[in-house]
Amino acid sequence: MFEILFWIYLVNSVSLINHEIDSAYWKEWDLFRLPGGIPGFLIIHLPLVFLILYGLILVFQQTFAGLMFSLALSLAGIFAFTIHMFFIRRGRFEFNVPISLFILTATLIVSIVQAIMSIYLLRI
């Protein structure tokens, strides 16, 4: 079961990192009113990408911490979808193109599966 979770975590990591690349295109720092522009956005993402990849290692090692990282990543994916849909419904145009919507929707689906698997493995 951990092996399946590893691959789901990897797919979700790629999806979320790809979303963050898309976020740079849409200047997400303006959407969330974050200071620092692109330099600040990139600085914030240095530790985030590190933590995502570190979590993948911990899932591969089948540790409790890996399950917690997996659950956190899945919640981040669900949050990413939810907050962007909120902004789209409020009339923001960012991320309202087919590829951005596909990435967000795929992230949601994979994140839900990942959350279910993580919770299941935490319970056994």
Image (tube, helix red, strand yellow):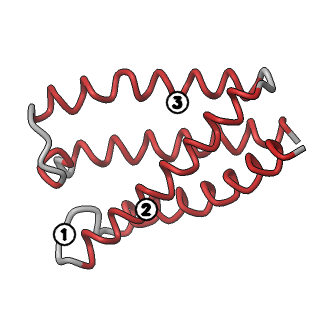
Q: Is residue 82 above or below residue 119?
A: below
SS label for mark 1? loop
* Quadrant in which the C terminus appears: top right
Q: CA distance from mark 2 to mark 1?
A: 15 Å
Q: Is residue 2 above or below residue 12?
A: above
| Image spot of residue 40 (x, y percent) | 16, 28
Q: Residue at x 16, y 47 (%)?
A: 27
Q: CA distance from mark 3 to mark 2?
A: 17 Å
| Image spot of residue 81 (x, y percent) | 43, 62
Hey, what amino acid is under mark 3?
A: Ile
Hey, what amino acid is under mark 2?
A: Phe
Tell whether 123 sits left or right of 56.
right
For residue 81, the mark is 2
Q: Which residue is mark 1?
A: 93
Q: Residue at x 64, y 60 (%)?
A: 112
Question: Who comes first in sequence, dot 1 or dot 3?
Answer: 3
Local crowd at mark 1 within 10 Å, few (<14), some, or many (≥20)? few
Local crowd at mark 2 within 10 Å, few (<14), some, or many (≥20)? some
Front disc: 2 or 1:
2
For residue 52, the mark is 3
Q: Which of the pair 120/28 is nearer the observer?
A: 120
Tell whether 59 sits left or right of 97.
right
Tell whether 1 sits left or right of 40.
right
| Image spot of residue 12 (x, y percent) | 58, 45
Q: Residue at x 37, y 60 (%)?
A: 100
* Quadrant in which the N terminus appears: top right
SS label for mark 3? helix
Question: Who comes first in sequence, dot 2 or dot 1?
Answer: 2
Front disc: 1 or 3:
3
